Amino acid sequence: MRILLLFLLPFTLFSQKTAPSIYNKISSLQLEQNNNYSINKIVKNFEKGAFKKEDKPQIYKKLGSNTLWIHFAINPSKKEQFQYFTNSNSYLAYGKIYLRKGDKIDSLQQVSNNVNFPHKFVFYRDPVWKIPTDSLLKTDIFLKIKNKNGRTRLLFYLENENEFLKRVETEYTFFGLYLAFLISMTLVLTFFAVLKKEYAVLFYALYIVTAIIEFLAGKGLGVQYFWSDSSFLINNFRSLSQTLGTMLLGFFYLKFYNFGKKEKISKSVFKWGTHLTIPLLCVYVYKFFYGGLESYFLTVWIILQLIIFTWILNHFYLTYRKQLPLYLVIAFVLPIVAVIFGQMFNPSVTNSLGVFFSGPNTYYLALSIEILLFTRFIFDSVINTQKKYFKLKKVSDELKYNFQNKTLEIQHQEQNKLVSNVHDTFGGYLEALKLRLLQKAENTPEKIQEILDAFYKDYRYLLNSLYAPKINSENFVESLVEFCEKLNSITEQEIKCDFNISNIDLHQEKCVHLYRIISELTTNAIKYSKSSEIKIVLYQKNNKILILEVLDNGIGFDKNTKSTKGFGLKNVQERVQQMRGVLEIEANEIGTKIKVEVPINEYPPY
């Protein structure tokens, strides 16, 4: 905002210093279309008192098909050889000045935004006439004005050469600051888009470029400096740049805004509005090659107004949905309100501040605020998105690191467990077999066969406990039944199964944990309990709790004194804790009962 105030300050000071005292001398006469009087007849009407002064003249008039005659007089002067008369209206349709000194009537050049643009006579953006002054006679000035298109701006200045050049210098200082602001914002956004690889921002940067073109065209600077010899650009560049700017804005909205699944209609509104500008631009291509369609810009403005109106409603909806911040809607609406205000506001010529804010100046001020607020939105959105990305990446890296550590820990535990099982089980058999082979006296085939059978049986137990099928909620019970059948085929104990669960959806991780617990408890019961029967029961309670019971009629153990290493209860306890369940153990001389309760619907933590 400081940058905006910086380049507005000179123009504000300029508007306060230029009191249009010429209006005290001006009188006017408005004639209907059919009354196309000659200058001689106009002079006679003036002498008869047909020209009248307005009590409160305003800077805009709507002439339609009428002709407006303006009169003022320049007194004799020996100091000033010329007076500069300016009408601050870059697109005046027709203007011609007649000079009367005594009985002699002369004319100065005719100006028109279509034929004789004012820059061809004076290097300036607005129609200006260099009027010679007489040292003896008063000079009567008669200005003839015609303009059928909309309102006619009648902001006049009558100055000597020094005053004229000073005002022009001040105006161009303001224009230079404003253009510097727009160009700098374009460069900043372009650099930001490339640096952050947010190429959708380039659409908004290009939109500012069209705003620069529109400013040059609206202020007459484009005709003065760039496209003075192209009648097509003189008459079409403003509406063409506005159409192109609307298209670029639409593409920016489509590519940069984050539309959720419920905002499909909002996205379609932007999409159709954007696509509607394409045939409008194609017509401009046709006009460039073939001409015609002089009033086409009026149709374009109506269509653009409809598009912008729907986009305003769309922005309000997205703000209501909390997809966009409120200040962004204000930024979008401000230029539209400024255009409406500029078209309706018609200040008095004596109100210098009102004159400054009339016409397009209010729009350019609102456009600057819009660009600043949209730039803030772009920066905030991109920076916040990248902050979220880096935050998620950090969390992802931490999870990945923890997962890898956990995986290594589990692998280490499983390796140690496997080594322990192999050592405890097969080591004893190999040692017994070695002693048996060395003791030749007692080295009988029956004894060796007995050792090998026991060795093979424990080998089968170990393989069965290490086997890990791909378990999920659908094949969980089927995998448990298959496990029990395999155990029954290789063990002398009777393995009974009772799996009474249905219509529950268990998480895969929970299925694996339960399978491992059943495998651990059953295999250890076979090896250590000296039981004749092992029963595995699995059922559900109130569709909330899953209950597992492993029972045997063996010798039991003292859980307070006996090491739990052989029974693998440590691993069982860890798995139960991961499932946020409860483990209960009952052991005595007539058997062991181990009960596990886990919640059905609660997922295990990762």
Image (spheres, rainbow, N blue to C red):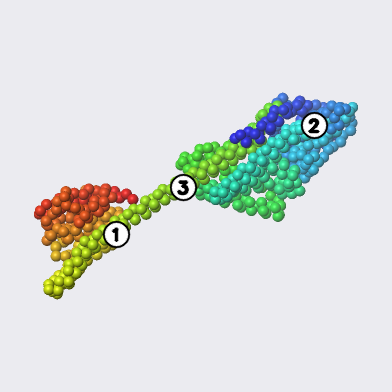
- The residue singled out by tag 3 in the image is 390
Residue at 77% in and 28% down: 22
Q: Quarter of the image containing the N terminus? A: top right
Q: Residues within 10 Å of mark 3 (few under 14, many from 20)?
A: few
Tell me, for residue 136, which label it has, or none. none
Dot 2 falls on a residue whose secondary structure is: helix
- The residue that label 1 is drawn on is 415
Residue 240 showing in the rendered view = yes
The percent position of residue 102, horizontal first and vertical second, equals 89, 29
Looking at numbered disc 1 in the image, what kind of residue is underneath it? Gln
Distance (Cα) linking label 3 and label 2: 62 Å
Q: Nearer the viewer, mark 3 or mark 2?
A: 3
- Which badge, 2 or 1, comes first in the chain's sequence? 2
Mark 1 crowd level (few <14, some 14–19, many ≥20, 10 Å Cα) = few
Q: Quadrant of residue 182?
A: top right
Q: Which residue is mark 2?
A: 162
Work out whether residue 298 or residue 550 is closer to the camera in this orientation and state it: 550
Quadrant of res 357? top right
Residue at 37% across / 51% down in the picture?
402
Amino acid type shown at disc 2: Asn
| Mark 2 and mark 1: Cα distance apart in space | 98 Å
* Residue 113 placement, left or right of 442: right
Disc 1 and disc 3 in contact, CB within 8 angstroms: no
Q: Secondary structure at mark 1?
A: helix
- Percent x, y of residue 104: 89, 33
Q: Position of residue 5 (x, y in %)?
A: 63, 33
Q: Is residue 38 left or right of residue 248?
A: right
Q: Nearer the viewer, mark 1 or mark 3?
A: 1
